[in-house]
Image (cartoon, helix red, strand yellow):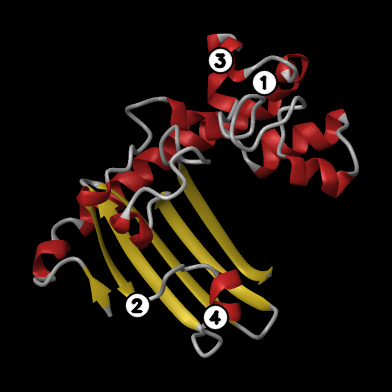
Amino acid sequence: MDSTITNYWQLLYRIPVFIALWIAFILIKYPTVFVGFFVVPFLYRYRHKKYEDLPAWTKPWANPEDWWGGPAGTEESVPQWWINRYEGVTFWTWYKYHAIRNPANGLRTYEFLDLDIVPEKVEYIAYPTLKHYDPWYTRKYTPDVDFYWYLTWQGWQSCFKIIYHWNDEKHIEFKIGWRVNPGDRKGFMDPDGVRSDGAGFATKFLPWRNG
């Protein structure tokens, strides 16, 4: 067990607030996701426009990470790995990425909704102690570890993640909260990367995932 706190009773009164804030964000995000099914097609015409030049109404559905000018974006306003996967970009593959796979991630651009990570303010409790809490890492460097989790928070914004390896190829993953992890305590990772505009909110439940 690794932790930044010694008195775990201090954590108990925070957990109900963490849960309440997760629910509140979900109540904001998923209606925005639903609206995005109908709005995202109108963003297609702006895919060759840099993020900073987009109209204000597009921002809830235009993720600064993926749009042209962002750390993972291209002139097609999707990541290069997505272009490689589909051997190019059509309207459907572009729509699938922004409306279905990564919906409403532009909400992270609103300061009252995102999390600007400050390493010295990050706290966590995690089991076991790992450098990275991701399947690619544990399979390669700690193959004896099949189950791990963490609860990380900065102020009242938090993230809870669980991983269990079913076998050498499949795992279950559950994640909810802002994209802050135990490693952020040691320093803001990749300051010019995907979280440079603030850590967004994620919900993930993958019961039978490859990789």
Mark with earlier residue (4, 2): 2
- How far apart are the two marked residues, 1 and 3, measured between alpha carbons? 19 Å
Mark with earlier residue (3, 2): 3
Question: Label 3 neighbourhood size at 10 Å, few (<14), some (14-19), many (20+)?
Answer: few
Is 158 on the left-hand or right-hand side of 139?
A: left
Mark with earlier residue (1, 2): 1
Q: Which residue is mark 4?
A: 141
Foreground: 28 or 192? 192
Is 166 on the left-hand or right-hand side of 190?
A: right
Where does residue 57 sit, x and y in percent of width and height? 56, 12
Is 182 on the left-hand or right-hand side of 141?
A: left
Please tell me whether residue 180 is drawn above or below residue 128 in the rendered image: above
Q: Which residue is mark 3?
A: 52
- How far apart are the two marked residues, 4 and 2, measured between alpha carbons? 16 Å
SS at mark 1 in the image: helix
Q: Which mark is residue 39?
A: 1
SS at mark 2 in the image: strand
Q: Which residue is mark 2?
A: 127
- The amino acid type, in three-letter code, at marker 2 is Tyr
Residue at (88% x, 31% y) in the render: 90
- The amino acid type, in three-letter code, at marker 3 is Glu
Mark with earlier residue (4, 3): 3
